[in-house]
Image (cartoon, rainbow, N blue to C red):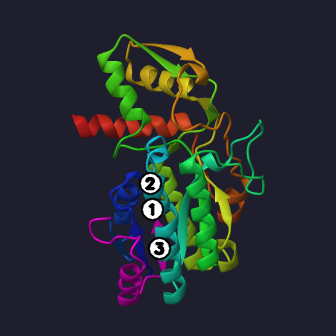
C-alpha cells in the first residue's frame, strides 16, 4: 500500500487528486498546503517527511501568477525553486520518489512543431525561469524525480481560463481573445489521473523504476489557440457572447507568453501505456461538473 504525499493540495491538480483518491481505497494519501507546511522551510520539510513513511510525493505546489511574478521575483524563486529543493532533499533522504509538475513556458522560441522533451529550453520571464530552475533543483537533490511539463491547466476548482470565460460570457456581449498563441488545454483531472496511473504502473512492476526518473510532457490531445478555447466554451454552454480574435501585441502583459508551446506526448504515452483524452472531450466533462456544482 503506497503512502502518497500531495503538496499544494488546495490547487487545481491537488484538489483533483483528492477527488480521485477515493478510487484508491487501499492507498494512503496525505494532503497538505502552505497553511500546514511551509515548503520553503527546509528544516520543517525534512522533519515532516522523516516522521512519515512516504513512498511518493506529488508536488503540485507552485507560484503560478505569471504576471505578478515579474513584480515578486523573490517570492516566485522561493516557491518554485527553494521549496522544490527542500522537498527534493527530504525525499532523497527518506527514500520518497518525487513527481514534480512544471510548465510549457520553459519553451519560448520560433519552433512550430510539437516540443519533445529533449528540445532546447528558452524560458522568458520570472515564472518560466524559476520553473525551469525548480526542475533542475529537483533532479539535482532527488535523482528519483519524475518531471511532467504541462500546459493551460483548468479545472472545476480554483481560478482558471474556463471559469473566467464563463463569467465574462455571462456579463458581456463581446470579448476579444488572443488567437496567435498555440498550445493545448489540460484538464487537471486528466493530469491527476495520469500521475496516479504512473504510480500504479510502478507499484505493480509493469513499468521499471528507472523509467520513473525522467522528464515527460502531458497535456490533452489536439491543438488550440486561446480564441479556439473560448469559442469551444461558449458553444458547449450555449453562451451568445461574440468572440473576436486579436494578436498578442494587442493585449500586452508584464510577462511574455510562448507563441507556440504544443507538447508532444508520445514519450509518456509509450512509457506508461496512457491514453490521453482529446481536449474538447475533457472540456465537456469539466463543464458538466461545473454545471452540477453550481446547480
Task: Give the mark, 2 or 1, whose residue is nearer the N terminus.
Answer: 2
Q: Which element type, helix, strand or loop, lies under badge 1?
A: helix
Mark 2 → mark 1, Cα distance in angstroms: 6 Å
Q: Is residue 60 magenta?
A: yes
Whether label 2 touches label 1, CB < 8 Å: yes
Is residue 274 visible in this depiction of the protein?
yes
Please, what secondary structure does the residue beneath circle 2 have?
loop
According to the picture, the residue beneath numbered tag 1 turns out to be 79
Q: Position of residue 30 (x, y in %)?
A: 34, 73
Evaluate if marks 1 and 3 touch, with contact meaning CB atoms under 8 Å apart.
no
User: What residue is shown at x 50% (from left), y 65% (from top)?
Assistant: 196
**Residue 63's disc number:** 2
**Element at label 3:** strand
- Which x, y percent locates residue 4? 42, 75
Q: Is residue 142 magenta?
A: no
Looking at the image, tell me whether mark 2 or mark 3 is earlier in sequence order: 3
Separation of marks 2 and 3 at Cα, in angstroms: 18 Å
Q: Are the two marked residues, 2 and 3, in contact with CB atoms closer than 8 angstroms? A: no
Mark 1 residue crowding within 10 angstroms, few (<14) / some (14–19) / many (20+): many
Badge 2 density bin: few <14, some 14–19, many ≥20, Cα 10 Å = some
Label located before the other in sequence (1 or 3):
3
Write down the residue under mark 3.
57
Q: Is residue 115 above or below residue 272?
A: above
Task: Tell me which residue sits at (77%, 36%) in the image.
Answer: 110
Quadrant (top left/top right/bottom left/bottom right) for the N terminus: bottom left
Q: Is residue 5 left or right of residue 186?
A: left
Is 231 above or below relative to 38? above
**Callout 3: 10 Å neighbours few (<14), some, many (20+)?**
many
Amino acid at each position: 500500500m503506497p503512502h502518497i504525499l500531495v503538496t499544494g493540495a488546495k490547487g487545481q491538480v491537488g484538489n483533483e487528486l483528492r477527488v480521485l483518491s477515493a478510487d484508491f481505497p487501499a492507498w494512503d494519501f496525505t494532503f497538505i498546503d502552505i497553511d500546514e507546511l511551509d515548503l520553503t522551510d527546509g528544516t520543517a520539510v525534512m522533519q515532516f517527511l522523516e516522521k512519515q513513511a512516504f513512498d511518493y510525493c506529488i508536488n503540485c505546489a507552485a507560484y503560478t501568477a505569471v504576471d505578478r511574478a515579474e513584480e515578486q521575483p523573490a517570492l516566485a524563486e522561493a516557491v518554485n525553486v527553494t521549496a522544490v529543493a527542500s522537498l527534493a532533499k527530504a525525499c532523497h533522504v527518506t527514500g520518497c520518489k518525487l513527481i514534480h509538475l512544471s510548465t510549457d513556458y520553459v519553451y519560448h522560441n520560433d519552433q512550430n512543431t510539437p516540443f519533445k522533451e529533449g528540445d532546447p529550453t528558452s524560458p522568458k520571464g520570472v515564472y518560466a525561469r524559476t520553473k525551469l530552475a525548480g526542475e533542475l533543483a529537483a533532479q539535482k537533490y532527488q535523482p528519483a524525480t519524475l518531471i511532467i511539463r504541462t500546459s493551460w491547466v483548468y479545472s472545476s476548482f480554483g481560478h482558471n481560463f474556463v471559469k473566467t470565460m464563463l463569467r465574462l460570457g455571462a456579463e458581456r456581449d463581446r470579448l476579444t481573445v488572443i488567437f496567435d498563441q498555440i498550445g493545448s488545454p489540460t484538464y487537471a483531472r486528466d493530469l491527476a489521473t495520469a500521475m496516479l496511473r504512473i504510480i500504479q504502473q510502478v507499484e505493480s512492476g509493469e513499468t521499471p523504476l528507472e523509467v520513473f526518473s525522467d522528464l515527460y510532457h502531458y497535456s490533452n490531445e489536439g491543438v488550440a489557440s486561446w480564441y479556439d478555447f473560448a469559442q469551444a466554451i461558449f458553444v458547449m454552454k450555449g453562451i451568445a457572447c461574440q468572440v473576436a480574435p486579436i494578436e498578442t501585441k494587442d493585449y500586452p502583459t508584464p510577462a511574455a507568453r510562448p507563441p507556440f508551446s504544443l507538447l508532444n506526448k508520445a514519450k509518456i504515452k509509450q512509457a506508461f501505456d496512457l491514453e490521453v483524452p482529446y481536449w474538447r472531450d475533457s472540456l465537456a466533462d469539466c463543464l458538466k461538473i461545473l454545471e452540477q456544482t453550481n446547480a
